[in-house]
Structures are given as structure tokens and as C-alpha cells.
Amino acid sequence: MPSRGTGMNRSDIKSSDSKPRPKHPNQRQLSRFINGELSSENQAVMERHLERCTKCARRLEHIDGDTLGERLLEVGTLLNQSVAPGNQAIPESLRNHERYELIECIGAGGMGDVFRARQRSMDRPVAIKVLKQSLFENDRAVARFQNEIRVAAKLNHPNIVHSYDAEVSNGLNILVMELVEGEKLSDVVEREGTLGGDEAKEIAIQIVSGLEYASHQGMIHRDIKPQNIMLLPDGKVKVTDFGLAKLVLAQSEDAAGSLTLEGEVFGTPDYIAPEQIRDSASADFRSDIYGLGCTLYFLLSGTPPFAGMSVGEKLAGHLEHDAPSLIDVAPGLDPGMLAVVEKMMHKNPELRFQSYAELTRAFSGIGNPARKEETIVAQRKRSTGKIFAVIGGPIMVLLALWLFGLIPGMSSSQPLGDLPTGNIKFAIVVPSRFAFHPEIQEISRSLKRYQNVELEYVSDQAGRVKFSSRKKGAKPSVVEVTRTLGELDAADFDALVFTGGWNGDSPDSTLYAFDPKLNDQARDFARSMLANRKPVGSICGGTAVLANAGLLHGKKAASCRYISDAVRDRSGAIWTELPRRDDLAVVVRDDLLVTGGNYVNAPEVVRLMMDLAQESRGSATEENR
């Protein structure tokens, strides 16, 4: 559009690298830019300035008249769009891959097609994503892709789909990933309808756990949406496609031409954060929180926040308009959940949750903590219930015939054996001296969320154990210990957790790690638990007990800043990177072993161990039957 008036000259706006300090455009100039009233030369100058100046970019949101949203109605972007069913043929060039046998297509999306495959050398199932060639049109794209996946491959968390390998094979760029036998949250809602508040919250807490871990490793996702979150049959949740969003973003930045909105926007229109629309490169973990908020909106209402609109209208909605209130689209929703989702979706990142820990606390405060929460596993039984409604009648008839001995080869007199009944029982091993109060407190709080749990504190000697908070003048907590570990029978417990003292792995506190006799007791008890498929866990200095007992040899384990190098070195464990701060500690699960690097990890350690203990109960029931 021709320029009206003098407009702006190159001398009015200088590069942010120039001196003196660059001049910022005024309100009128920004308005004319939005309405396309600048000359093509001045328009390009303005775009370069806005690319570098976040302050001016934010001012665009408050321009009267034709808004940024109006301009976006005409903008083509690199937005990740719909996901199609998996019906693509196996590429001819991959049919005889020397390391992977591709079996069938199981999904297709904006970045490529996903195939079920088998890794020949290890005879294990994997998923292979064949990425679109359009992502690799410049010389640096392949190298960047492999670098991003190397970073993503370091993410080792139960709520993140693991990336194994990336390569160029016969001209195709492929990503080899963990095969997850589950379904996308988008498919769950499409098949079963909206989720209840408790179930959505439990799903969100797992997603937050994975995102927080990735954030501590220096990675953000940039494309959180229901299609990128897998729900497994056992209720666990896994986030997929880490690293790919950044690959596409970087590819767009390398493209020739001016840096316009077309080259800056990446995400999915229904779930993209406002700041990603303005400049994807400036996104941080709060952008993922926004995407998760939109995902929760979808899970609770059945539709994304700005459903039924064009791409441009959706982008304008995220930038300038409030989505329909969940009160209207999801009646009966807990007010606490409503407030959390609204804060997650605030258009200003500074007014969202400022850490994942803060968001987790907000979720924990929703509803009545004393009420027994329905687990995802129980909720998933809705589908099983529908099936049982069809076949339940015949089963009841067969059961009646069996009870009366009318089915050959079966007799009602055959015993079922001792079936696991009653509460899930935890044994919590604490030091008799220097026990760390926050550690014990977090474990206790986490276990109290479940009504079907009993816990018993045990130590190296009976009596009163004081938990120190290390705060001057703070009154220590006290528990009564009636038995030592050597007096317990592993058959009476479903889970075992070791804790450490506040002074780390000092022999003065963590005696079960350093006293030979006590360490033998710990090893024998833990081995008995593991032999019966029962979980064994540890937090912080408690991991030294497992390490010195030889139980971590060849196993993955979470590093603790308070465990000495000597203990780690002689353990033979595969340790995570040592966290720089306590709040950066992580949780690692290796089969039935669950280790947490610090007391902040207690809720996640407890959650994983509860899942494992319940699985163990279920397996024992089936075996006895």
C-alpha cells in the first residue's frame, strides 16, 4: 500500500547493534505499520527493528484501529496443523534398512509420518518418524536436526518419550524413538468425551513433571498440545516430539528474505502462546505452560479455546481476546481448576505461573486433599466397563456354572490362594540421627493423598527420632520408631524407601549405608522386595544405602549433591548429571528402583512407587488366580 505522509526513514531506526541507542517508533508509526501504510522500504526497516525490540513488539498489542490480529488474517505461517490417520506406505528406500525393520504406519502429522518398527540388533520395538523433506532445504538443517536430537536424547524421564537415534537414510531424515503403546489425548477425548477435573489434573501433574525436568536440562517444547501427549493403558502420560519444534523454527530463520511474521511463527494455532506468535525464538517454559493450559481447556471442554475459526482468527484470539470461559463450556468444574487454567492461559507471561513448582502446588491445592482421588487407572476402566456391559452376562453365567462344578475340568473347591488385600504398606527407613525434616515431611504429605496407604517408620534403633529442619530455633518433629529393618518381614510390605540425613552420606547419620551389618540388612531386605516385584526407592542421601549395598550396579540413578564422589564411583551406577542446585534434582526409575536426587523429588518418587506397588498387587492377584 502506498505510503501516506513522510513515514519513517532508515535514520529513524537503527540496528540494535549500532550506537548510539536506537530510536523507537512512536504510536502513530506502529499503527501505520500494522495497517500496511508504510512504504515497502520503511516497512522492512520496521520489521527488522521489531525483530530485535521486544518492548516495541509488545506495544503492538495495544494499537487502536486495525489490530495485529487483522494483519494475521492474511499471514501464511509455519504453523503445525492437523494430524492424519496413519495410512501412508512404507518408503521404498527404507524397506530394507540394515538396522530397522519398518512394519506399518501408525500416524502422520505436520512434521512427518510415524511407523512401527523393530530394531534388528536388540530385537526391540521402536517408533520411527520419517520427517518431511521440506524441513531440510538448507545446508545447515541436517546438522541442526542431529544436534537437537542429541540434546533431546539426554532427556530420561518417565513422562517423556525417549529419543534413541537420528540419521539420514537414503536421503530421508529419520528419528528413532521409544514405541509407546497408547493413544493421543486428542483421540481419548474424541472417543470418550471430556475428562473430569480430577483426571485432567492428574494428567497435567504428570505432564508438568516431564516439562519441568526438560526445562532443567535446558529444553522447552514449543508445541504442547493433546496430539503430542500419549496416554498409556496403565494411566501414565508421556510427552513426545521434544526438539522438533526448534528444528522447524531454526529452518524458518535460515530462509531467505526479510524476517516477517511468516518466518517467525511456529506452533499449533489452537495451542500457541501469544509470545510465540510475536517471536518464537523468545519463547520460554512459560510458553509451554500456556500450551498446557490450552490443552487442559480442551480436555475439560472438548474443544480448543478458539475453535471454529480460521488460522488467522485463532492467532488473533490468542493475542487479543479471551477464550469462552470454562464456566460456560464445562459446567460444574471445580473453581480451583478454573482459576489455575485461567492463570496458565494469561496472555502476559509475567502473570502466568513463574515456575513449574508453583504450578504443581496450585494443582495440589485443587479440591479436598482429604478426599480419595480417583486415579487415571480407575478412570480408564470406563472403557472396560462398556465392554463388560456387553459380555458381562455370559461371564456371570459361566461363573455360576463353575461355582456349581458344572464346567468340566473346573471345580469350586479349588483354592484361589492368598490374594493381596488391604492397604498398600510402605516402610520408610530414616536415620536415627540428623534425619532431614523436609524429606520426611514431603514423603508423608505425598502418601497422605492416598487413603489406602499405611506407612511405618523404621530406623537403626527403636525409640524417638527427631527430624531436624536446619532452621535456627525451629522445633524438631518427632516420630516413634518401634522396629528396626532387621525386625521386619519383607512379605508384609509393598514398598520400601530409604532416606538420608541432612549432612548427606556422613557415616554419623546414614548408618544403613556405612555400617556393614546394617548395610547387609538393607541389601537383603531390598533384594527380597525386588525378587517379589516390589518397588524400592530412595531420596537424596538415602541413595547411598542402595549404592553401598551394590544394588545400583549397572542401573540408572539420580545424582544427589550430598552423596560423595567416592560412593558414586564405586557403586557402578549410571548417574545423572550432578544438579547445580537442589531444585534441579531429578527422579530416575530403572525397573523397580526409583531414586530421587533431593527432597523436592519426594512427590514424584512416591507417585511412581505407588504405581509400581499397585501393579505388583495386580500381578500377584493374577498369578494366584
Image (spheres, grey):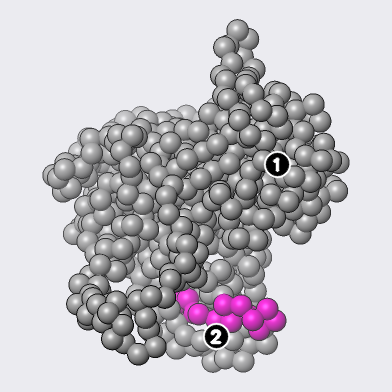
Task: Quote the CA–CA distance across marks 1 and 2.
Answer: 52 Å
Q: Which residue is mark 1?
A: 486
- Point out residue 491 in the picture as x, y percentages from the top left corner: 59, 53
Please tell me whether residue 395 belongs to the stretch shown in magenta: no
Local packing at callout 1 (Cα closer than 10 Å; few below 14, some 14-19, many 20+) is: some
Q: Residue at x 55, y 36 (%)?
A: 456
Q: Is tag 1's residue or tag 2's residue first in the polypeptide sequence? A: 2
Q: Nearer the viewer, residue 331 or 370?
A: 370
Please state which amino acid type lies under the numbered disc 2.
Leu
- Point out residue 73 in the picture as x, y percentages from the top left corner: 25, 55
Q: Nearer the viewer, residue 411 or 506?
A: 411
Q: Nearer the viewer, mark 1 or mark 2?
A: 1
- Magenta-colored span: 113-125
Tell me the tag on residue 210: none
Q: Which residue is mark 2?
A: 102
> Relative to residue 229, is residue 34 depicted above or below?
above
- Quadrant position of the C terminus in the picture: bottom left
- Point out residue 533 in the picture as x, y percentages from the top left corner: 59, 60
> Relative to residue 140, is residue 65 depicted above or below?
above
- Point out residue 480 in the picture as x, y percentages from the top left corner: 58, 25
Q: Residue at x 81, y 50 (%)?
A: 571
The secondary structure that most of the magenta stretch takes on is strand
Q: Nearer the viewer, residue 413 or 572?
A: 413
Q: Is residue 289 visible?
A: no
Picture quadrant where residue 141 is located: bottom right
Q: Nearer the viewer, residue 253 or 471?
A: 471
